[in-house]
Amino acid sequence: MNWKELAITSHYKTAVAIKNELKQGHIKYSTTGIEELIDALSRSEKRVLRSQLTRLMMHIIKWQIQQLKLKKYWKMNPI
C-alpha cells in the first residue's frame, strides 16, 4: 500500500487502513501509515492557516485604505 498517496487523497481512508493493519498485527507497517497521515494533516493545516492569514491581511489592508479615504474626504469637505 502506498501510504503517502492514500494520506494525501483521504485522511479517513488512511485512518481506516491503519486500523486494519493494527488489527492484523502489522505494527511496523501501520507506523509508516501513521507518520504519513500526520505529515498530510500538517500540510493541510498549514494551507488552511496560510489561507486564513492571507484573508485577514486583505481585510486589514482594506480597512486602512478606507480610513485614508475617509480622512481625505473630511479634509476636503469641512463642516
Image: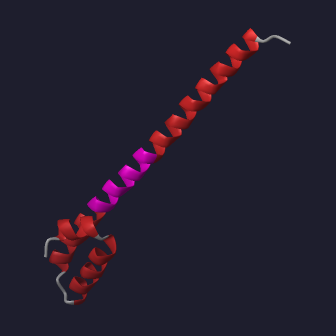
In the image, is 43 to the left or to the right of 24? right
Please, what is the dominant secondary structure of the magenta stretch?
A: helix
- Residue 10: x and y in percent read 29, 71
Q: Check if residue 46 falls in the magenta segment.
A: yes
**In the rendered view of the protein, which quadrant contains the N terminus?**
bottom left
- Residue at the extreme right of the image, as rendered: 79
Quadrant location of residue 50? top left
In the image, is 49 to the left or to the right of 17? right
Q: Residue at x 27, y 59 (%)?
A: 39
- Residue 34: x and y in percent read 26, 70
- Residue at the extreme front of the image, as rendered: 77
In the image, is 69 to the left or to the right of 60? right
Q: Using the image, determine if residue 43 lies above or below residue 7.
A: above
- Residue 26: x and y in percent read 17, 83
Q: Nearer the viewer, residue 57 or 2?
A: 57
Q: Nearer the viewer, residue 37 or 73?
A: 73
Q: Using the image, determine if residue 24 lies above or below residue 4.
A: below
Q: Using the image, determine if residue 62 lies above or below residue 37.
A: above
Q: Residue at x 31, y 54 (%)?
A: 43
Q: Residue at x 26, y 68 (%)?
A: 9
Q: Which residues are magenta?
A: 39-51
Q: Nearer the viewer, residue 68 or 77?
A: 77
